[in-house]
Amino acid sequence: MNLADIYEALADAIGERDALVFEDTTLTFAELDATSNKAAHALAAVGAEPGTHVAMHMRNSLEFLECLIGALKIRAVPVNINYRYTEAELTYLYTNSKSKVLVVDTEFTPLVAHVLADCPDLKAVLVIGDPVPELVAAGAACGVSVQRFADIYEPASDARDFRPRSIDDKFIVYTGGTTGNPKGVVWRQEDFFYAALSGGNQYGEPRESIKELTDAAVDFPPMTLLVTAPLMHGAASYAMFSMFFMGARQVLMRNFDHVDALKLVEREKIQIVMIVGDAMGVPLVDELTANPDKYDVSSLFSVANGGAIWSQASRQKLLKLLPNTFIRDSFGASESGADGTVTMDDEGVLRLPPSKHTTVVNERLDPIEPGSDEVGYLARLGHVPVEYLGDPVKSAETFPVKDGVRMSILGDMARVEADGSIVVLGRGSGCINTGGEKVFPEEVEQALKSHPAILDTLVAGAPDQKFGQAVAAVVQLREGFAEPTLAELKEHLRPLLAGYKAPRSLVVVEQIRRSPSGKADYRWAKDTVSR
């Protein structure tokens, strides 16, 4: 199950079906295959070959997707680059990833010019648009080829004349780096297909052959997904590949804007909108609540959330407006793929259904007995990544082997109910130890977001002489609301949380810092509450 092989088979089976809408351009599966062939030949022309790491420093665009598929076609390894990163972070990421070829949007070329001399692995830079003069000069000084992507792409062949590929070809997903330096998660493509892409079937059993997958895609009913998040994050790339492999049509946004997203739902008759937690879900729902008759969203039947928690308060608002909407919450990570669909009860408790590939283990990596109150670590079994790129110590910790079974263990704490379902408590690394009591930030954040004045929040541990750590909250207020006092917040939280979980301090900020996909920046939150 090689990703490029699968896409090419789909292009042959459903080539005339619309695959992608981006701004004013629509491409069928066959057309996207042909343009990706041109991108593949363009990458090869500047030195990309099997195993070459190709850094993709771009916002969402046709070129992003064409280069992504094109790299896979020539067995190169695409590397996702966070376009929010500063010079120091980019230097780290370019060098840590050992990227040889860089594809970058024009707007980011001034940054590239400043770091190029410190990135000795880079040999070629392809610019979407025109490179700034500083980058051209920096490339000349460093012996790095700097060219316009269009100049290489336009004359390139669209022929599908590539060498045979392997299920062992690699796919790299860099983590968001919200709790430390980003890490390059290295997947075998077949493992990635089964773990991250649910085996090509989000709604049932995995496909066991390419023919089975293409036959199912031929019969798949018409469906359109709105991709709102940046493709440089795992949540969006997982969703896009998954829906392509089922034969769906997708609409891609260059940048997320909640008003534009609702206009696209109306214009393109979107049926599924993907979001990443509150950063996207809250403004969408608030806009619909404020202007219920402004947008025709009658085509919408599902909102698919993944990558971050979408608060109960916001989703209840949506269901009040659109009671027949199906909300689907995917739980997963760069290091484990899509672990399953979680349910959330009225208290915001997350549960994963029983699964043969997800379990909870103790510190000895032994499974925890269902029905016990023991808290352990959530573990993905079987199809898991090979390693963290260039970090054997952390790789051995995160991807251990027990009795011949490979696991991915990230530190998410959980317990197993008597029926085998898994209650997800939160990330252990973010757990706050206050006087011996353990508090998971996600639980407190859920409760805080039910307060009418709070638009967004992150919770972290602040240093405390008496308790070691104290629960502290950073909050962003809704427009027009006064700042609540700590006493008012504690009174609001009294029926929702045990007293020791309520914040002991509060910092109000203009905006909660999150990644472009909506993931929380807990390093920033901890620094903010510790000042």
Image: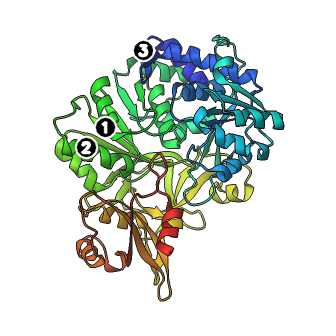
Left or right: residue 179 versus residue 517 is right
- Residue 286 in view, yes or no: yes
Identify which residue is drawn at 58% across, 36% down.
107
- Do labels 1 and 2 touch, CB within 8 Å? yes
Q: Which label's residue is closer to the chain start, 1 or 3?
A: 3
Give the colouring mode of the picture: rainbow
Label 1's element? helix
Label 3's element? loop
Q: Which label's residue is closer to the chain start, 3 or 2?
A: 3
Identify which residue is drawn at 59% across, 49% down.
85
Relative to the observer, which residue lies in front, 170 or 98? 98
Residue beneath label 3, please?
17
Q: Amino acid at mark 3?
A: Arg
Q: Amino acid at mark 1?
A: Val
Identify which residue is drawn at 51% across, 48% down.
357
Left or right: residue 321 versus residue 476 is left
Q: Residue furthest front?
A: 133
Label 2's element? helix
Q: Which label's residue is closer to the chain start, 1 or 2?
A: 1
Which image quarter is the N terminus in? top right
Residue beneath label 2, please?
287
Residue 259 image label:
1
